[in-house]
Amino acid sequence: MLAKGSLFSRLINRLWVTSKHVPFDAITELNIDLQRPIIYVVEQNNASDLLGLQASCKQAGLPDPYQTIDINGEQISSLIFIHNWSFFSPNTPQLQDAPYLTQYQQLLDLHQADNSLDVQLIPVTFYWGRNPGRAGKKSFLI
């Protein structure tokens, strides 16, 4: 995975990753409270999705998905991956081994310890494609 803030990730983000988030004004339309913890629920752990998410969060004024969240003195990731496996992995992960179950259990435990805890889970979906307006234009890479 690309390291946050690395020169290579910033270069890729600037040259190749353009994003359009829906809804346009996510904070208002989804009633997101920036004072409460935000956790992004993403389908899979891959660099292109994370770069797109980071660009969209910055554009929408949402917290950086690479930042950890401090809840009652415990640092937790602001990302939950439903599928956290590699195509080249020798074993297909089983449902009971899914890392997101551990993360959800950690959130439930934190909530049981503090009933006032109100974490916002934001589901994120990516649709990758080419901008129809660029269909006939040549790229400097091709």
Image (cartoon, rainbow, N blue to C red):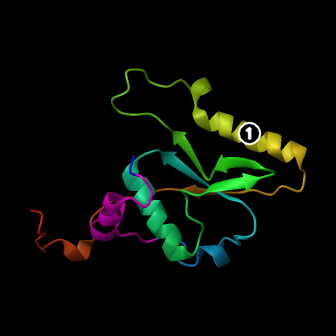
Span shown in magenta: 3-20
Image position of 138 with respect to 81: above or below = below
Q: What is the x, y in percent for residue 125?
A: 49, 56
Q: Residue 65 lies in what quarter of the image? A: bottom right
Residue lying farthest to the top in this orientation: 91
Residue in the picture at 36% in, 65% down: 10
Q: Is residue 127 left or right of residue 117?
A: left
**Residue plotted at (47% across, 63% down):** 54
Image position, residue 44 (x, y; %): 47, 44
Say which residue appears at 45% left-offset and 34% top-offset. 85
Q: Which residue is mark 1?
A: 106
Q: Count all numbered tags in the image, as a single digit.
A: 1
Seen from the viewer's position, the closer of residues 88 and 23 is: 88
Crowd around label 1: few <14 · some 14–19 · many ≥20 (10 Å) = few
- The type of residue carrying mark 1 is Gln
Q: Horizontally, is 88 left or right of 26 in the view?
A: left
x, y percent for residue 81 = 54, 44
Q: Is residue 7 magenta?
A: yes
